[in-house]
Image (cartoon, rainbow, N blue to C red):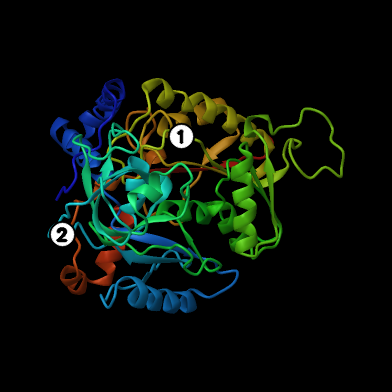
């Protein structure tokens, strides 16, 4: 059941995707009608939030049971006001908790006073966030602090900042209470940060994690947690997280190693590296060393000083490497209007290959390389695997544990056996569902876990081992 319109793309990007998702390999295997149904279902899913909020527990500091109890109390008392929403443990991922998302709630009354927010802010609201001042584009003419307002997303980016009304395409996100007046929000000396609207009736009810157990939980999408388990770092090893910001996977790797060994985290943007360091400090993980460095230049061609602990690194320096590559991000949910051009979308494949080539050289023989993206394209996923296996005879695809997503997508010339070793999270694997308290109470826990496994962001994972002496 679709509440919002399907995701929209620029025309040339839409053509590019349509051709990709109607490729001959797929049509021969599934038939044209099934291929088309799956593609249209995927487009609908991408504009809606996942069915669950996933949080990873910082097991370095607390047990999952203890955090589950704290989180349940916080949600019932502070946020869901008596609604009996469960906090679930995952049978295959022992360090995550799942909270069902209630919605879409179609009976909400809309108020005369309106607030228009940017698309990115709107996406965050659909996943449980309040509205912060930088995300507000316009408000009704006489909006006062403390007023009940209806919040809408300007999904096409056409509303002018400070406008008093907006008649363009907007989608309803829910109702809230304004913390500030219109004049305070848009005055030249007004606050640039801080909360602007406190959401009290969102269309999709998810818990907000602003300052909720900050040392104990980290908000992550389910497939992003799975990646670290698949790399499976061991205490005492030297691990490289090549494109690490904001540090969710980096800190997870360190926790899985019981903070013993070394996790080198790199990102080429200084502010993002600062965020990695802050997260490591917040979660009290000491084995992480973060560096501002371009991953494509991380291989040292000459002998280094022994004392140098940062990049560039000598060949065969790492036991395991995670390349969670920069990508077109088309798997992120919710997103109602994807704004990148075809030139931007296709620019990622060559960058990913540069990073991958460096990763292979930095990996020790016998070492493990995990490649992942949060996108849905063949060119950044299965095509990259086909290229890697052809370019680097030393690499071999490996089974993944846990294997929770589907197999890889046809269209890149990989064999069925190879596709089964890949993990593609395709949200269209399950129907869009409305979740309310009654249906939640009637659901079996196994069915809810199965839904959480499928109704998540679009994501891709491949695991390789570097063979000895080849």
Provide residue 443's location: percent of width, then percent of height: 20, 70
SS at mark 1 in the image: loop
User: Which quadrant holds the C terminus?
Assistant: top right
Provide residue 146's location: percent of width, then percent of height: 30, 62
SS at mark 2 in the image: loop
Q: Residue at x 50, y 36 (%)?
A: 326
Q: Mark 2–mark 1 contact, CB under 8 Å?
A: no
Residue named by callout 1 = 327
Give 171 or 422, whichever is nearer the viewer.
171
Give 130 or 321, whichever is nearer the viewer.
130
**Marks 2/1: CA–CA distance:** 37 Å
Residue 211 falls left or right of residue 77: right
Provide residue 143's location: percent of width, then percent of height: 27, 52
Q: Residue at x 51, y 56 (%)?
A: 229
Residue 367 falls left or right of residue 30: right
The numbered dot on residue 155 is none
Residue 368 visible somewhere in the drawing: no
Q: Quadrant of residue 136?
A: top left
Pointer 2 or 1: first along the chain = 2
Residue named by callout 2 = 108
């Amino acid at each position: 059941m679709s509440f919002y319109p399907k995701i929209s793309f620029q025309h040339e990007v839409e053509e590019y995707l349509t051709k990709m998702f109607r490729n001959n390999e797929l049509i021969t295997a599934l038939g044209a009608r099934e291929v088309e149904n799956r593609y249209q279902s995927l487009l609908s899913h991408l504009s809606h939030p996942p069915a669950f909020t996933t949080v990873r527990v910082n097991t370095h500091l607390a047990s999952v049971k203890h955090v589950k109890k704290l989180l349940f109390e916080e949600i019932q008392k502070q946020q869901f006001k008596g609604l009996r929403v469960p906090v679930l443990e995952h049978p295959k991922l022992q360090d995550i908790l799942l909270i069902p998302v209630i919605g879409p709630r179609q009976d909400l009354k809309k108020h005369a006073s309106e607030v228009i927010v940017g698309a990115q802010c709107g996406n965050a609201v659909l996943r449980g966030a309040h509205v912060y001042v930088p995300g507000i584009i316009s408000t009704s003419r006489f909006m006062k602090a403390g007023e009940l307002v209806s919040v809408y997303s300007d999904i096409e980016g056409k509303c002018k900042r400070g406008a008093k009304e907006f008649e363009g395409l907007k989608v309803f996100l829910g109702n809230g209470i304004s913390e500030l007046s219109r004049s305070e929000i848009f005055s030249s000396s007004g606050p640039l940060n801080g909360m602007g609207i406190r959401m009290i009736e969102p269309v999709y009810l998810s818990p907000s994690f602003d300052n909720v157990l900050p040392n104990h939980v980290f908000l992550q999408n389910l497939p992003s947690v799975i990646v670290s388990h698949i790399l499976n770092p061991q205490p005492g090893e030297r691990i490289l997280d090549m494109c690490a910001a904001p540090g969710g996977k980096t800190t997870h790797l360190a926790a899985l190693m019981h903070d013993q060994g070394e996790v080198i985290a790199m990102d080429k943007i200084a502010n993002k590296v600062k965020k990695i360091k802050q997260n490591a400090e917040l979660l009290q993980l000491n084995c992480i060393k973060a560096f501002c460095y371009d991953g494509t230049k991380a291989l040292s061609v000459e002998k280094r000083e022994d004392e140098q602990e940062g990049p560039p690194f000598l060949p065969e320096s790492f036991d395991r490497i995670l390349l969670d590559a920069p990508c077109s991000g088309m798997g992120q949910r919710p997103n109602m209007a994807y704004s990148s051009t075809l030139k931007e979308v296709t620019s990622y494949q060559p960058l990913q290959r540069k990073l991958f080539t460096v990763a292979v050289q930095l990996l020790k023989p016998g070492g493990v390389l995990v490649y992942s993206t949060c996108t849905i394209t063949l060119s950044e996923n299965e095509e990259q695997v086909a290229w890697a296996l052809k370019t680097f005879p030393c690499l071999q695809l490996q089974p993944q544990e846990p294997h929770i997503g589907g197999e890889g997508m046809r269209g890149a010339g990989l064999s069925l056996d190879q596709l089964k070793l890949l993990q593609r999270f395709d949200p269209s694997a399950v129907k869009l569902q409305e979740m309310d308290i009654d249906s939640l109470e009637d659901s079996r826990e196994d069915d809810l876990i199965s839904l959480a496994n499928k109704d998540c962001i679009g994501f891709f994972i491949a695991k390789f081992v570097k063979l000895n002496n080849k």
